[in-house]
Amino acid sequence: MDFCQIELSGHIIDSLILPKAMDIIMDMGGDFKVLEFEIGKLKTDISYTKIEVSAKNSKRLNEIIGELSEIGASVSELKNANLVEIKQDKVAPEEFYSTTNHLTFVYVDNKWLEVENIEMDCMIVVEPQNKIAYCKPINYLVKGDKIVVGYDGIKTVPPERSRGKQGFFEFMNSEVSSEKPLMSTIDDIAKQIKEIKDNNGKILLVGGPAIAHTGSAPLVAQLIREGYIDVLFAGNALATHDIENALYGTSLGICTENGWAVSRGHRHHIKAINEINKHGSISSAVENGALKKGIMYECVKNNVPYVLAGSIRDDGPLPDVITDVIKAQDEMRKYAQSVDMVIMVATMLHSIATGNILPSRVKTICIDVNPATVTKLADRGTAQAKGIVTDVGAFLPLLYEKLLELK
Amino acid sequence: MDFCQIELSGHIIDSLILPKAMDIIMDMGGDFKVLEFEIGKLKTDISYTKIEVSAKNSKRLNEIIGELSEIGASVSELKNANLVEIKQDKVAPEEFYSTTNHLTFVYVDNKWLEVENIEMDCMIVVEPQNKIAYCKPINYLVKGDKIVVGYDGIKTVPPERSRGKQGFFEFMNSEVSSEKPLMSTIDDIAKQIKEIKDNNGKILLVGGPAIAHTGSAPLVAQLIREGYIDVLFAGNALATHDIENALYGTSLGICTENGWAVSRGHRHHIKAINEINKHGSISSAVENGALKKGIMYECVKNNVPYVLAGSIRDDGPLPDVITDVIKAQDEMRKYAQSVDMVIMVATMLHSIATGNILPSRVKTICIDVNPATVTKLADRGTAQAKGIVTDVGAFLPLLYEKLLELK
Amino acid sequence: MDFCQIELSGHIIDSLILPKAMDIIMDMGGDFKVLEFEIGKLKTDISYTKIEVSAKNSKRLNEIIGELSEIGASVSELKNANLVEIKQDKVAPEEFYSTTNHLTFVYVDNKWLEVENIEMDCMIVVEPQNKIAYCKPINYLVKGDKIVVGYDGIKTVPPERSRGKQGFFEFMNSEVSSEKPLMSTIDDIAKQIKEIKDNNGKILLVGGPAIAHTGSAPLVAQLIREGYIDVLFAGNALATHDIENALYGTSLGICTENGWAVSRGHRHHIKAINEINKHGSISSAVENGALKKGIMYECVKNNVPYVLAGSIRDDGPLPDVITDVIKAQDEMRKYAQSVDMVIMVATMLHSIATGNILPSRVKTICIDVNPATVTKLADRGTAQAKGIVTDVGAFLPLLYEKLLELK
Amino acid sequence: MDFCQIELSGHIIDSLILPKAMDIIMDMGGDFKVLEFEIGKLKTDISYTKIEVSAKNSKRLNEIIGELSEIGASVSELKNANLVEIKQDKVAPEEFYSTTNHLTFVYVDNKWLEVENIEMDCMIVVEPQNKIAYCKPINYLVKGDKIVVGYDGIKTVPPERSRGKQGFFEFMNSEVSSEKPLMSTIDDIAKQIKEIKDNNGKILLVGGPAIAHTGSAPLVAQLIREGYIDVLFAGNALATHDIENALYGTSLGICTENGWAVSRGHRHHIKAINEINKHGSISSAVENGALKKGIMYECVKNNVPYVLAGSIRDDGPLPDVITDVIKAQDEMRKYAQSVDMVIMVATMLHSIATGNILPSRVKTICIDVNPATVTKLADRGTAQAKGIVTDVGAFLPLLYEKLLELK
């Protein structure tokens, strides 16, 4: 039998942190005694509790503490984090601490360090001499790195549910359904976008090829031209079909104006790649006057950076596509920490990939006609994502109209 | 071994009638010899073929002829249809002819009679003395009715694929996908609606409660007020939530303006029913000034007839709901034969029910976020239905805008 | 400004009742002060809290109290419920109390009465002289009924989350996903079924026609024969296609053995109805030896009652179908209160209809390949339903195997 | 105005080739005259037709001929294919011929050459001196390659619909629905698998991580051990979760035996990667005794080659994953031409990627709970794919049982 005291503070009841903590302890076969409990008397007050957790042995106790630490509990008796040096590249000791996507602190030499570049499923590397700590994906570990093991000296701060201020991120619950008043949801998103842009915030668009197929590429191009989008993550498909549309008026050979199949249209996406190959890159094609409109054109013209990540279903791909997926991830990481909002449109692959590297503090909206995309995104840890089950071909025109109204 | 000659004429190749006929013969173990074949030399020409069909025995031959007759083949040697008198209410002889939803003729006393009120899965009742033939659902058969058995003297005329004239019903293939240029589809539908209304045609709207949940009830109300809708089929749910929305601004307790759950809102749909109960009917509530807007209000005000069919999941229901489903079907039948277009919005139950009683000549559009609704509709015989996989909450505003533009 | 004290007790933290209460108060613009708080020190202890709720006026306070009462809060100062006499059939006073599906008590003449036949969206009728209280759907109200208005003297008891005892209903969370270990889920369900049957509990099967289409009718027939099913709710479609399958080996004309379309198979469901019409009812057809196997056959042979509820998409229907949906609901109500478990298979319509009349205490499983069915069921108040997103054609054979293993 | 004669022969009516040809000509604004027509008199006879196609100018005529050539029409007056030399790496002349996935011949120096390694969306490179022709993806073109432009001298042979021989690939039509008799479908697939294996044919499995999540990894491992699978295409996710399951009994931290979340389980997939990193590769881990069961283990033990293709959502990835997607495609190409059947299980990404490089002659089954996967696969050209909408977690156990029965 082993014991330990933990503390929880904040809006721990209405943010469900205390119930979750009790769940964890009991589900894992532990036991608890509430030692202190000060409930916030008023709704603005925070609550505080000290709980004694017990388990049959110290191994199990540690496991429980591990889980609790991820929802924001901290061990009362403050200990420095345990650091272990990596002996072999890419190989961590068994007990490595695996990060969440929440704001995280690590206690080193009796000081709390904020973990930089936080993203889920990584190790925490500490440089005690430099007083810094940061995330590293497992395959970037090199011999000599000092990483955190176990749960001592770790504190995470999940985003608190805000309240009282109306708006999209307040009212949307996790339910994924198409039976919602769509127009008011779009209204809220438009207001959020405007607020972020008014404050010089940054918005990342993650888009799939359905944007082009549904004929919405010109609208997204306009959003970029008007400064709503600060960075674009996509794949070869969106870029190719956008360029196909700009050059030949089709997407996958279907005319985006009238929905008819076009003669020999199935060659068009290869022709589009061929055209860009001629110039060596999308930006050269723009400079040479070969590409004159569309999403990619506007990105080039407006200095909006884009990351085109390769996938095994790519034709071509375009010369700008990063075919090594790990390099593509790293390129995406350059932007993920600094954006304020992510809008994911009709792409399960890129949405989950982006979700993987996003801190939980970033507002995340996922628009897809398939409820499963949103469900999977949340199941894989991007719990902050708000899902809107709707048709991209209808969502984008309606969003654009709302943004116009707000101007 | 038994033989028989059949004839096919029309655009039998590009309408796939000839290939289907060959399929049927071969799949059913028959054999064929092409006796005559005149292919339309030019694209405007029709083709003609006479084929000798053979099968191991006359039973099998009859089965083959039966299938062929449903795709428009007629037996060369013209015979009068076989009529058998019903001996017991609701009970037909084994070999009853079961109707399709295509234009159908029956040869009686050496004359072709058009079958009136054609709908699928019915019997053909003939009154030889009155020289009329019409459809009857099985449970309406009464002793003494003369119905058609077997396949002699039956001719069906499936709708031909038109061609060369651009428009929604020409280009949409049966594929059900959300990856289509939605705006051009909506454009085409709007043009079709305008064309039908310009020619004094009639449009039937079949709607589900998602119209109210997504906040689109005011738009549909406006479509009715402006004369686009001539008859409405719905259930208790759409009517109740539309009235709930008109009275309390909510649908299932969710504010349709801002998507928030409203205090005690889950009582609202019962309150709405309670309110109508007070007045005895929707129209009385309108007359008494208790109901002042919304879909049902506009129906009453603009003399647009509606059929509210009951379902076992109904609360209440409203006094206007026809709780006996067979009576509801009959009420629906009063309108089904005379409309030119049906727009089905977000209701699998009512869409399939309407499809069941529609002649195949009626243009049918089915809008649903769930591809399965459209697939099932077609699987159950309403093959003329064109499906649009999109979000109702987005589709209706966009359609309404297009209609405004066309005015 | 108005005040009121409420009390909560039980596992109010880990059952999320306290967090929900705080949510409600704050979301509705109220305020609270925690007056007393005794947290369960040990995991088996229950907690207790007394909270002072305040709001800007008594109307708003009442609304808040109303919401709180539905999650199990009771007003500290015990008052008798307010009873109002109905003046007009089917019409309730504005402030009627609308039931939840939770165990409910009403305080009348200083005594708690349990509300009988509890189901959601009903009124509570009290007969003070007889000391009974029971649910009535709105349209059953008759002049002179005394019903509860407002929230005084009402106490609801939502089912508590049990814990520590392994099993299906413990581990399944509300997430609806097809990415779950299906076999272990099936295992758990089989064990639950066995346990219920070992204790002479009753199981209700709610089934859609996909049972027949997927070729699973013989398996369900076997489950009935072996005593696993005590009552069946279905529609005309399941019964017709089951009988079609028993008589002709097809479902909607598709051979259920090999999946091939059968010649003239589209007549089969009408033929099946015709055959039953001949005998006047399903049970007569069984007695006369015309129907010799299948789900409906086994129901008749094993005295398993069935309710076949009509729907507007019905062909026929069979003589046993109750075409008036309100009568069908009442017939279903006869069984809904006394079953221990409901298994809903591939039918959104009948599942929601059944959910509407079920007390929340009844274990409810909903199996559907479409996640939306489960989502909608929960959205409409049947929150106890556990969803399994899987293919019926695969689920039933696997469940049957598990049940065999457990015998 | 320009003219040209084309010929069609084979089962051109019931294989829909003639109707499609007429469609193409008319949809593209051309005209036709039927010059000769010999319809197969008996069902075993083939038909032949010679048609004069005309169009307003030679550009349009060529476009029409281009489309016709893809469905198997050949220009009557035989011309050699036009070859053009590539002037810049990766850049083709505008009029490049883009391949289909059908068996293709090219007429060079008055001889028909079969195009090797046929796959869709490629160029045809001809080496006239070596009398060979083969496919090249656009980005592999190098200066000096001679590729085919225009449509002269090209003949494609789409797979004919077989008939009369019962079996899965005969009866399944393109409709994607979960309302099918699943057991008979599984039966057919099992027989096809057995037949292929009895003839020493090769089967490719393309699998997604849902195989592991649903607890089916041990079954797939068994299929590999018993020789049913000859090559595996997957991603990092399937391999990682399979190894996670082998080492820790979980998939994404969920116990695959009982569906419970496991303490600190979200670390498990990283731990699994860590463990393999320690050994440097999956095969080393197997050799060193660290990995003792599961899909990947059986692949190593039974010399079943696997291609693990990277994706941007990968954690890690495992050292065996090919992170450059173009290299991964090439690795997949090594197997795609030589397999007889492909079974795609629960992965849209890998299924479409594999479909892209498969010749249309390869039997292809796609199993997914989401109908959209199958729809998209067909929309992107893999028209031979037969879809089964079912739950992987149920499908695999049932398929395995059927295979056992057939042994």
Image: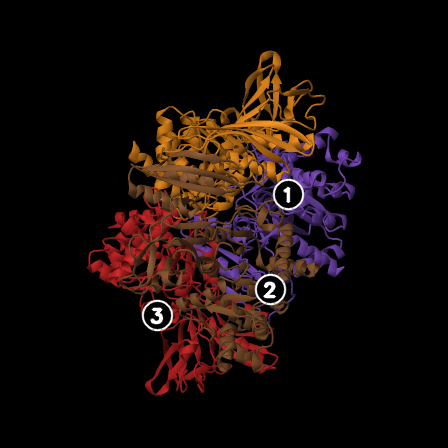
Chain colours: A purple, B brown, C red, D orange
Q: Chain of mark 1?
A: A
Q: Amino acid at mark 2?
A: Ser
Q: Amino acid at mark 1?
A: Tyr
Mark 3 or 1: in front is 3
Q: Nearer the viewer, residue C102 or B395?
A: B395
Q: In the rendered structure, are the residues bearing label 3 and label 1 in contact, judged by CB atoms less than 8 Å apart?
A: no
Residue C240 disc label: none
Q: Nearer the viewer, residue A192 or D272?
A: A192
Q: Chain of mark 3?
A: C
Q: Are marks 3 and 1 on the same chain?
A: no
Residue C2: image location, x then y, percent: 58, 82
Is residue A332 visible in the rendered image? The answer is no
Q: Are marks 1 and 2 on the same chain?
A: no
Mark 1, residue position? A134
Mark 2, residue position? B216
Mark 3, residue position? C333
> Furthest residue to the front?
B110
Q: Is residue D38 above or below residue D109?
A: below
Q: Amino acid at mark 3?
A: Arg
Q: Classify mark 1: residues with Cα within 10 Å, few (<14), some (14-19) or many (20+).
A: many
Residue C351: image location, x then y, percent: 40, 61
Number of numbered callouts drawn: 3
Residue A195: image location, x then y, percent: 72, 58
Report how far apart the C-alphas of labels 1 and 2 lie in the structure. 49 Å
**Is disc 2 placed on a helix, strand or loop?**
loop
